[in-house]
């Protein structure tokens, strides 16, 4: 039984065999899993046949939706031609070469080489190893600390989870490891002081970063990693002056600037790269997710020539560049990456995101005055609605009440899927969504918001 209803056969099989990631396991036993059967376009259908609008692109990644025939054909053709090979020992495969060439063409800064991984977590984990390798190559063995940010999300490997600035990724896991520091989150609504202007907020957190670097010692800091727009922290859009304020501090001390474009990249924010939307100028870049539109796992690290040459020099001393993954540069994944970028370009997906953004923003604005809503925010077609117990004071709900997760469950009842992140509900629909489909997603969200208001009032959840 789950939620008072008997489990279907497939739900029971799931409960008997699958350990679910990022899931309150005790709640899963109460509520049961939602098992999806198939998808087409922006719609998903569970194994009972119920239809849902997919409002999160899965996990921020299914930018072309489900069942795209061109992507299916590209995967099928590559599987027939060469289903697997690797890049170790100087081996090459044409899809990996072609994708690297395309990534160099569209990169927001000059890029020399592309290193492949299987995921965004692996890409960010690799970024740390490469930063250490780079500084060893330059004779700076003490320059190894990585600065991340509170509320950042960079993945789930031991190092990527350490870079992440969310308590749920650390508690119970003996994380973060040493060499990782966390500076301020650039979310003005939540972390700006009373009476502090946005410009003053930026100046304060930039000084805080500078003070951290000086306190730790600039010669010990290897890199600074940042999502242009923070994703799993709640879709947090930095003030427009943020990166312009902090980048000179980082460059003054020869600290690498790593852009985690895993969620932002390939059109999501209305530009090819999130860094272009927020005025960030990275040294190196991590990419994944919409790199293949989620039709296969693939990640990548993009590095400039001067950094690559340091790798060459160091590997000549050591005898080899000793890093890589079995499935990094998988030919099917790379073929899908090539096809995805081709589709983004040919179908003008970036322009489509820009064209839909005013509708997205208008629908967010419509819920801004709701008693439960503290802030709405977005960059292109990724956004969030932050729920509050007290609109005037910005007081959050007691996490034990699970208000945002309850809204997400109400929404599933209305036939749409969004994601509860802390006190926020995140939106990240497939970039192929139409204006009518986007409006229908918000119509269903507004019904769930009304249900949540009734739930909060009935149960007295606003009480301090």
Image (cartoon, grey):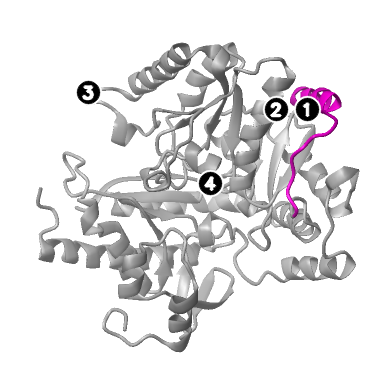
Label 1 neighbour load within 10 Å: few <14, some 14-19, many 20+: many
- Residue to which mark 2 is pinned: 133
Q: Secondary structure at mark 2?
A: helix
Give how far across and how far down residue 179 sits, in percent: 51, 27
432 horizontally vs 405: left or right: right
Q: Which mark is residue 155?
A: 4
- The residue positioned 45% from the left and 88% from the top of the image is 9
Task: Check if residue 278 falls in the magenta segment.
Answer: no
Q: CA distance from mark 4 to mark 2?
A: 21 Å
Give how far across and how far down residue 189 sits, in percent: 31, 35
Question: Closer to the camera: disc 1 or disc 3?
Answer: 1
Residue 11, relative to residue 311: is it above or below? below
Label 4 neighbour load within 10 Å: few <14, some 14-19, many 20+: many
Question: Closer to the camera: disc 4 or disc 2?
Answer: 2
2 or 1: tag closer to the N-terminus: 2
Quarter of image, res 185: top left
- The residue positioned 79% from the left and 65% from the top of the image is 74
Give how far across and how far down residue 97 sits, in percent: 85, 47
Task: Check if residue 321 falls in the magenta segment.
Answer: yes
Q: Secondary structure at mark 1?
A: helix
Q: Secondary structure at mark 4?
A: loop
Q: Secondary structure at mark 3?
A: loop
Q: CA distance from mark 1 to mark 3?
A: 48 Å
Rendered-image quadrant of the N terminus: bottom left
182 vs 50, nearest the viewer: 182
The residue stretch that appears in magenta = 305-326
Q: Which mark is residue 311?
A: 1
- Residue to which mark 3 is pinned: 195
Residue 433, relative to residue 348: is it above or below? below
4 or 2: tag closer to the N-terminus: 2
104 vs 36, nearest the viewer: 36
121 vs 346, nearest the viewer: 121
């Amino acid at each position: 039984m789950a939620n008072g209803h008997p489990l279907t056969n497939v739900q029971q099989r799931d409960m008997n065999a699958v350990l679910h990631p990022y899931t309150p396991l005790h709640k899963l036993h109460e509520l049961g899993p939602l098992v999806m059967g198939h998808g087409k376009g922006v719609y998903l259908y569970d194994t009972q046949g119920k239809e849902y609008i997919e409002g999160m692109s899965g996990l921020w990644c299914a930018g072309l939706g489900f069942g795209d025939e061109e992507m299916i054909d590209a995967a099928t053709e590559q599987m027939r031609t060469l289903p697997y090979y690797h890049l170790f020992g100087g081996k090459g495969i044409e899809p990996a070469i072609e994708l690297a060439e395309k990534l160099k063409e569209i990169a927001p800064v000059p890029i020399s080489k592309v290193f492949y991984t299987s995921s965004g977590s692996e890409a960010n984990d690799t970024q740390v190893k490469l930063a250490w390798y780079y500084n060893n190559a330059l004779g700076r063995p003490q320059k190894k600390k990585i600065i991340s940010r509170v509320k950042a999300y960079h993945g789930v490997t031991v190092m990527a989870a350490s870079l992440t600035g969310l308590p749920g990724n650390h508690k119970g896991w003996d994380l973060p490891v040493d060499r990782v520091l966390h500076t301020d989150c650039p979310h003005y609504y939540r972390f700006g002081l009373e009476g502090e202007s946005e410009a003053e907020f930026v100046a304060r957190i930039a000084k805080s970063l500078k003070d951290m670097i000086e306190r730790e010692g600039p010669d010990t800091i290897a890199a600074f990693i940042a999502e242009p727009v923070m994703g799993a922290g709640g879709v947090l859009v930095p003030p427009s002056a943020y990166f312009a304020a902090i980048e000179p501090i980082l460059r003054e001390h020869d600290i690498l600037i790593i852009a985690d474009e895993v969620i932002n990249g390939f059109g999501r924010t209305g530009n090819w790269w999130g860094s272009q939307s927020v005025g960030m100028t990275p040294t190196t870049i991590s990419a994944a997710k919409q790199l293949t539109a989620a039709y296969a796992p693939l990640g990548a690290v993009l590095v400039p020539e001067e950094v690559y040459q340091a790798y060459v020099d160091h590997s000549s001393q050591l005898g080899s560049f000793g890093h890589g993954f079995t499935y990094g540069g998988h030919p099917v994944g790379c073929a899908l990456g090539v096809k995805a970028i081709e589709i983004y370009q040919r179908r003008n997906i970036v322009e489509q995101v820009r064209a839909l953004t005013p509708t997205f923003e208008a629908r967010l604005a419509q819920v801004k005055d709701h008693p439960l809503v503290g802030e709405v925010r977005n960059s292109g077609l990724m956004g969030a609605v932050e729920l509050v117990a007290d609109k005037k004071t910005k007081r959050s709900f007691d996490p034990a009440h699970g208000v945002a997760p309850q809204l997400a469950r109400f929404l599933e009842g209305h036939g749409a899927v969004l994601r509860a992140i802390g006190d926020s509900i995140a939106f990240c629909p497939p970039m192929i969504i139409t204006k009518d489909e986007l409006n229908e997603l918000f119509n269903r969200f507004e019904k769930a918001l009304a249900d949540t208001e009734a739930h909060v009032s009935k149960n007295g959840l606003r009480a301090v």
